[in-house]
């Protein structure tokens, strides 16, 4: 959706996000390693290249799922929604007929859990849509744009402010609503300052993705919490350590 709003090639936007993604991954590895060292977590077995290769061979078919999702979107075979549906069918087939970990009797439970998880996301989106409607009626995005341009014409300072604004918006507003509300406004602001649209697209996606993991909205966080049957708020202390790594 970000690529469509900014009128960018999806492939170029993906390519632009590789370096930020790698840096975020390294930061998360660093935070995870530090927490493991601090709390005394350790591996049950010693690391082995041989064992890693064996595990990789066993998982090769399962690893086809993200390939289907990303490859299908990048090469224009299907949309993001269609790729998710195709990936589910593929994963179900692999789980039932190759790994044989999913039985027919497991399907009702899996479908029920999937429906509950989807309903959690839909309720969050519905609630966020009310907030989006209010901001549109009150013409808040245009007011923010005017205020920001009145504050500075420096591209670097403006980008820092946009980063902060998107981060805050992602925390309180559902991602799709934030894209529709804020991206056209931001595009109009930065087009006169010589800021590259690919850079802007990566900034938008990165900040709103962090918002999807951040309470109180935290759609991804709620889905994971439900999957592991944890109570609300149980993750708060651990989350802020992870957040510091992602935000850095």
Image: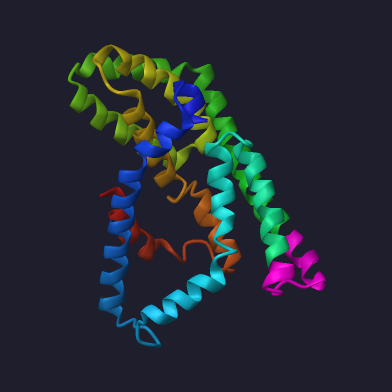
Extreme residue in the top direction: 192
Query: Is 103 covered by the magenta stretch?
Result: yes
Q: Position of residue 31 (x, y in %)?
A: 28, 64
**Residue depicted at 30% across the width and 23% down the height:** 196
The chief SS type of the magenta part is: helix
Instruction: Read off the magenta span.
Output: 95-112
Which residue is nearer to you in this view: 12 or 129? 12
**Residue depicted at 19% across the width and 16% down the height:** 153
Vertical arrangement, residue 56 with respect to residue 86, above or below: below
Q: Is residue 5 left or right of residue 87?
A: left
Query: Is 195 covered by the magenta stretch?
Result: no
**Residue depicted at 30% across the width and 48% down the height:** 247
Q: Is residue 109 left or right of residue 129?
A: right
Which residue is nearer to you in this view: 136 or 78? 78
User: Taking the image as drawn, is residue 127 in sight?
Assistant: yes
| Display coloring | rainbow
Vertical arrangement, residue 161 with respect to residue 73, above or below: above
Which residue is nearer to you in this view: 240 or 118? 118
Q: Position of residue 167 (x, y in %)?
A: 36, 39
Vertical arrangement, residue 132 with respect to residue 87, above or below: above
Extreme residue in the bottom direction: 45
Q: Position of residue 143 (x, y in %)?
A: 38, 16
- Where is residue 30, by image quadrant? bottom left
The mark tally for this picture is: 0
**Residue depicted at 45% across the width and 51% down the height:** 213
Q: Is residue 184 left or right of residue 128?
A: left
User: Taking the image as drawn, is residue 207 in sight?
Assistant: no
Q: Position of residue 121 (x, y in %)?
A: 61, 47
Q: Is residue 129 left or right of residue 244?
A: right
């Amino acid at each position: 959706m970000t690529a469509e709003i900014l009128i960018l090639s999806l492939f170029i936007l993906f390519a632009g996000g590789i370096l930020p993604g790698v840096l975020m991954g390294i930061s998360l590895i660093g935070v995870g390693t530090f927490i493991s060292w601090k709390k005394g977590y350790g591996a049950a077995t010693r690391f082995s290249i041989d064992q890693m290769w064996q595990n990789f061979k066993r998982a090769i078919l399962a690893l086809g799922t993200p390939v289907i999702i990303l490859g299908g979107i990048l090469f224009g075979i299907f949309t993001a929604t269609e790729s998710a549906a195709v990936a589910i069918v593929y994963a179900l087939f692999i789980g039932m007929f190759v790994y044989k970990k999913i039985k027919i009797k497991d399907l009702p439970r899996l479908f029920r859990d999937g429906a509950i998880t989807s309903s959690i996301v839909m309720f969050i989106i519905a609630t966020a849509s009310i907030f989006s409607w209010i901001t549109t009626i009150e013409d808040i995005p245009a007011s923010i744009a005017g205020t920001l341009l009145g504050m500075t014409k420096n591209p670097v300072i403006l980008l820092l402010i946009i980063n902060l604004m998107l981060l805050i918006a992602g925390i309180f507003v559902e991602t799709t609503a934030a894209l529709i509300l804020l991206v056209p406004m931001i595009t109009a602001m930065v087009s006169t300052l010589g800021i590259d649209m690919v850079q802007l697209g990566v900034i938008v996606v990165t900040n709103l993705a962090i918002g999807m993991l951040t309470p109180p909205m935290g759609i991804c966080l709620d889905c994971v919490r439900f999957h592991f049957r944890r109570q609300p708020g149980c993750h708060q202390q651990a989350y802020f350590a992870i957040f510091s790594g992602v935000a850095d």
